[in-house]
Image (cartoon, rainbow, N blue to C red):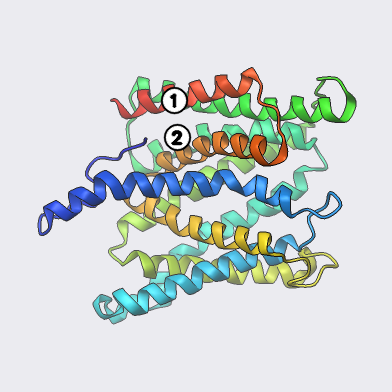
Amino acid sequence: MIVIPNVGVDDAAPGRRRWVRRTGWPALLLLSVLIYGSHTPLIALSKVSGRVPFSSSSYVLLIELAKMLVSLVLLVARDLAAVPYASLSWASAAPYALPAALYAINNNLVVLMQAHMDPSTFQVLSNLKIAFTALLYCVCLRKRLQPTQWLALSLLMGAGVCHSYNNLELEAASEEGVSKVNLHISAWGLLLVLSYCLISGLAAVYTELILKTQKLPLSLQNLFLYIFGVVLNGVAHLSGAGGQLGFLEGYSLTVWTIVAGQAANGLLMSVVMKHGSSITRLFVISCSMLVNAALSWALLGLQLTPLFALAALMIGLAIHLYYSV
C-alpha cells in the first residue's frame, strides 16, 4: 500500500489525525485504485451490439457537472464561512482555466491521433506520460528524485508497456487466431503522442501546484476547476462532439454507475494531488491496471498471461523502491 508521510497531521488532534493518516489515506488510495480499475470493464459491460450506446461528450460533461455540484455542496455545507470574500472572484478562479483547457486539448488529441497511428500504438506509447510527469514534477515543483526513485518510475512505465502489450496480444489472438500485433505510426503521429504525454504531465503537475500553493479550501478549488471543465465540455458537446446521439440516449444503470464512479474518483484525485503528489497519482493509475485485468478476467473472460504477472511484479517492486527512500 502506498503511504505518504505527514499527510493530514494536525497537532490540535494528534490521535484522530494519526488514525486518518494510517487508515483513511490508504483507504482513499485503495478506493481510487478500484474505481480506476473498474472503468474499462464497466464500459465493456455497457456496450450494446459491440458499441458504446451513449454520447461520449455528454458522458464527460455529466462527470464534470457532478464533480462541480458535489464541490459546491461541500463548500456551502462546510467551508463557506471560513472563506474570505475576496477569494470568491474570477481572479482566484482564473488559474484553474489552464488545467481544464489542457485536459480539453488532450481529449481532442486522442481523436486526432487516430489518423496517424493505430489505437494499439497509442496504448503502448501513452505510457511515456509517466516519464513526462516525473520530469515536470522535478522541474516545475523543484523536487529532487533519488536514483532509486527514477528506477522505480522506469519499472512503472515498463509495467504499463507489459500490460498494454498483453492486451494487444489477446485482442490479436481473438480476432485472427494468432498472437500477432501490427503497430504503425507516422512522424506526425509520434509528434502528437509526445505532445499528448507532455500535456498530460503538465496538467497533472500544474494542478498539484495550484492546489498546494493557494490557501483555499479544497472544495472551493475543486469548484473553480470543475466550472471551467463544465464550460469547456459543454461547448464541445454543443459543437457536435457527441455525434447523432441524444444527450441521455443509451444511459443504463451501468452507465450511471460509471458516471458516479468517475465523478467520485475525480474528487478523490484532487485530495491525492493536494495532500500527496502527482507521482502518487501515477502509482494509483498503475495499480488500477491490475484491478482492470482481474475484473476483466472475472467479468469478461479475459485470459491472464505471464505478462500480467510480470507487470504486477514490476509495480510491486516500483512501489517498494520509490517509497522506501
Q: Is residue 215 above or below residue 114?
A: below
Q: Residue placed farthest to the right in the image? A: 176
Using a 10 Å C-alpha cutoff, classify the residue at mark 1 as few (fewer than 14 neighbours), some (14 to 19) or many (20 or more): some
Whether residue 282 is visible, yes or no, is yes
Placement of 51 over or under 307, stated as above or below: below
Tell me what residue is drawn at x 73 percent, y 72 percent. 248
Q: Where is mark 1, residue-wise? A: 316
Between disc 2 and disc 1, the foreground one is 1
Q: Position of residue 161 (x, y in %)?
A: 62, 26
Which secondary structure lies at badge 1? helix
- Residue 90 percent coordinates (x, y): 43, 76
The answer to which of 255 and 211 lies nearer the viewer is 255
Crowd rating for badge 2 (residues with CA inside 10 Å; few <14, some 14–19, many 20+): many
* Separation (CA) of disc 2 from disc 1: 18 Å
Query: Total of numbered circles in the picture?
Result: 2
Q: Is residue 33 above or below residue 13?
A: above
Residue plotted at (26% across, 80% down): 81
Q: As shown in the figure, which amino acid type bears the numbered disc 2? A: Ala
Determine the residue positioned at 51% across, 64% down.
Answer: 97
Q: Is residue 31 left or right of residue 311?
A: left
Indicate left or right for 94 with 246 as reference.
left
Does residue 217 lie above or below 47 as drawn?
below
Q: Position of residue 308 (x, y in %)?
A: 60, 24
Q: Quadrant of the N terminus?
A: top left
Is 197 on the left-hand or right-hand side of 191? left
Percent position (x, y) of residue 143?
33, 37
Residue 184, can we see it? no
Which mark identifies residue 193? none
Q: Residue at x 59, y 35 (%)?
A: 294
Using the image, tell me which numbered label, if any, was put on residue 134.
2
* Mark 2 vs 1: CB contact within 8 A: no
Q: Is residue 233 left or right of residue 16?
A: right
